[in-house]
Amino acid sequence: MFQGLGRTQQDLLSALLYQPSGMSIEALAQQLAVTRTAVRQHLAALERDGLIHRGGTRPTGRRPEQLYVLSTAGQELFPRQYRLLASLLIGEVAQVLGREGLIAVLRSLGKRLASNLEQQAVSEERIVGHMNQAGYEAEVFFRSAGEPEIVAHNCVFHQLANAHPEVCELDLALIGTLGQAEVEHLECMLRGGQVCRFRLRSTPDDEP
């Protein structure tokens, strides 16, 4: 949840979570039992990383106190149940529309995602770039015959796809629409593969 953050920074973020209107350096120092200097240093690092931001000020009768507030990115460090919600939604769609209807919806979503990213066919390298921005660890691998393949070493939907294998159709539609080609799913982690491997195949209309 707080990977890469020290104990004091974790406690600081937790304190701000319970005070959505913000806290001052003085209040944080008292609550965490650390010096104001230490709080300033941690706040500077967390602000640099986009996990907190400066909110309003609070009058004190002297110099107004600057308040610090948890950012949206900071809030996202705390547990969320997006996977549960997604699984419930997919299950409901499958119940209402059936398996083929669910596949059609997922393919439509993949195509829509692709159309928001590119307006024309792009290379495997550019497709991999989009995948990596979405959280994949993907690369282009060239076989001995010189054919490029897209290799994903992880799947951002893996646990969701375990429950609903149809989710793979979203990836296939995304990749195929970006490359404007048919996609071969050569290896799949859901089917016991070590990675997910995809190869673009030109459609008959594209062949000379």
Image (cartoon, rainbow, N blue to C red):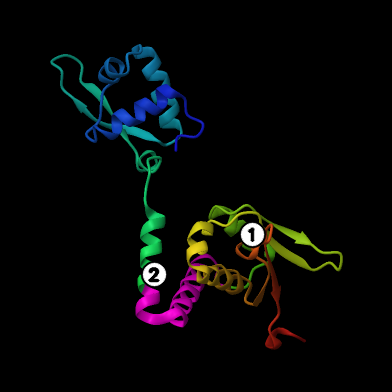
Q: Nearer the viewer, residue 97 or 59?
A: 97
| Callout 1 amino acid | Val
In magenta, the rendered stretch is: 93-119
Q: Are marks 2 and 1 in contact (CB under 8 Å)?
A: no
Question: Disc 2 or disc 1, which is closer to the eye?
Answer: 2
**Does the magenta-highlighted stretch encompass residue 113?**
yes
Could you say which disc has been placed on residue 186 in the image? none
Task: Pinpoint residue 21: horizontal percent, then vertical percent.
Answer: 22, 34
Residue 184 locus on image (x, y percent):
68, 74
Query: Which residue is the site of mark 2?
Result: 91
- Please, what is the three-letter code of the amino acid marked with disc 2? Gly
Q: Quadrant of the C terminus?
A: bottom right
Q: Is residue 111 above or below residue 45?
A: below
- Which quadrant is home to the N terminus? top left
Q: Earlier in the sequence, mark 2 or mark 1?
A: 2
Q: Secondary structure at mark 1?
A: helix
Residue at figure coordinates x 41%, y 56% from the top left: 83
Q: Is residue 69 above or below residue 189?
A: above
| Image location of residue 151, percent across then percent down | 69, 60
Taking the image as shown, residue 55 lies to the left or right of residue 159, namely left
What residue is drawn where x is 52% and y is 65%? 117
Question: Disc 2 to disc 1, how far (Cα)?
Answer: 29 Å
Kind of element beneath mark 2 = helix
Q: Would residue 165 appear left or right of 203 to someone viewing this image?
A: left
Depicted 205 relative to depicted 170: above or below: below
Q: In x, y percent, where is residue 43?
A: 39, 25
> 15 and 148: which one is in front?
15
In magenta segment, residue 62:
no
User: Where is mark 1, residue-wise?
Assistant: 128
